[in-house]
């Protein structure tokens, strides 16, 4: 789930219920249910490529060895290989919006986070969400945080959006075009790395102001010792019961999760790419939240 306890408000518009909870923050704060790899819901799907250090495709970024002017510590360098002419790219330091559409009403946005571009290539989009970032999150119509509502009614009670602020540690988000997930990195105070968080979601669509997606409820937490565990399986099941996912969509999400687990098991990118050593440019300012944060894209670029 994409909403977390690190977001916390001013009132917005009332919207129907659809998912967000503090799973990423629980994962980031080290709340682990198990030690070691946790069996997932089924074996890796047939035909899913298993990237490894020795067989990683050329498009996978490798750890950087020098610091470009755009950041204090460089992002892992991306390969120059590209299968097609690259579209217009955002430059490091540009500010864009990372948004999620409402699961019940996909023409509406219920999560919006301004972020700063770290890297934007044909192989990878990397963005930084700084501490103190103003953001939009869903709450129940009476202002109750979503994760405090009992699961049975969590996705059926009316909601509204809340203008808030990200008060946890900053988050680095990594997304490869076409992947039905993004990978988020969390740190503790003092830049002690904590974990990766695999947020299963619809492949992101680019537009001039940022990227849009739809959250798929089920997530995976990955730890530095290479162990991992599923997150929010209960919410995934409840979303299915409440009609927010069809059987076909749920099967596709499970398949995407198995594909992500295959990459984790092989310890391919981005887990082996050195992103945990990346640091933001101290000159970057916290992006503002525009008044028209929920505007519809004038044209999709991907």
Image (cartoon, rainbow, N blue to C red):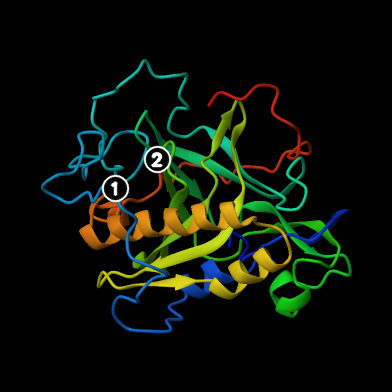
Q: Residue at x 22, y 49 (%)?
A: 51
Q: Residue at x 47, y 47 (%)?
A: 180
Mark 2 and mark 1 residues within 8 Å of each other at the beta carbon: no
Instruction: Examine the rendering and report whether any part of residue 184 can be seen.
Output: no
- Please tell me which residue lies in front, 213 or 40: 40
Quarter of the rendering occupied by the N terminus: bottom right
Q: In the image, residue 48 lies at what x, y percent?
A: 30, 49
Q: In the image, residue 111 lies at what x, y percent?
A: 68, 51
Q: In the image, residue 150 lies at what x, y percent?
A: 74, 80
- Please tell me which residue lies in front, 17 or 168: 17
Q: Residue at x 49, y 71 (%)?
A: 231
Q: Residue furthest top?
A: 85
Q: In the image, residue 214 lies at what x, y percent?
A: 62, 48
Res 220 → quadrant: bottom left
Res 301 → quadrant: top right
Report the side of 250 relative to 118 (left or right).
Answer: right
For marks 2 and 1, give the CA distance: 19 Å
Instruction: Examine the rendering and report whether any part of residue 42 can be seen.
Output: yes
Mark 2 or mark 1, which has the lower sequence index?
1
- Residue at the spot of label 2: 176
Camera-near label (2 vs 1) is: 1
Report the side of 77 relative to 204 (left or right).
Answer: left
Vertical order, 233 against 211 (above or below): below
**Badge 1 element:** loop
Report the side of 17 relative to 236 (left or right).
Answer: right
- Residue at the spot of label 1: 47
């Amino acid at each position: 789930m994409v909403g977390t306890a690190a977001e916390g408000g001013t009132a917005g518009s009332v919207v129907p219920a659809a998912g967000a909870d503090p799973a990423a923050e629980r994962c980031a704060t080290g709340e682990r249910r198990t030690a070691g790899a946790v069996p997932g819901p089924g074996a890796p799907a047939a035909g899913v490529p298993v990237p490894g250090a020795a067989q990683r495709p050329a498009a996978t970024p490798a750890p950087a060895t020098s610091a470009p002017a755009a950041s204090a510590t460089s992002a892992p360098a991306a390969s120059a290989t590209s299968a097609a002419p690259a579209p217009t790219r955002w430059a490091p330091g540009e500010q864009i919006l990372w948004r999620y559409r409402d699961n019940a009403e996909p023409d509406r946005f219920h999560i919006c986070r301004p972020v700063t571009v770290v890297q934007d290539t044909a192989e990878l989009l990397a963005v930084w969400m700084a501490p103190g970032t103003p953001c939009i999150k869903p709450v129940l119509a009476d202002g109750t945080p979503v994760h405090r509502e009992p699961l049975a009614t969590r996705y059926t009670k009316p909601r509204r959006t809340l203008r808030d602020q990200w008060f946890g540690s900053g988050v680095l988000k990594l997304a490869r075009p076409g992947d039905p997930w993004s990978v988020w990195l969390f740190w503790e105070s003092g830049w002690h790395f904590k974990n990766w968080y695999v947020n299963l979601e619809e492949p992101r669509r680019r537009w001039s102001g940022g990227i849009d997606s739809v959250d798929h409820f089920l997530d995976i937490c990955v730890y530095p010792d290479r162990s991992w565990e599923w997150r929010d399986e209960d919410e995934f099941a409840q979303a299915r019961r409440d009609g927010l996912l069809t059987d076909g969509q749920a099967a596709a999400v499970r398949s995407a999760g198995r594909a992500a687990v295959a990459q984790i098991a092989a310890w391919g990118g981005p887990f082996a790419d050195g992103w945990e050593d990346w640091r933001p440019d101290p000159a970057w300012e916290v992006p503002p939240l525009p008044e028209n944060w929920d505007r519809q894209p004038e044209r999709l670029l991907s």
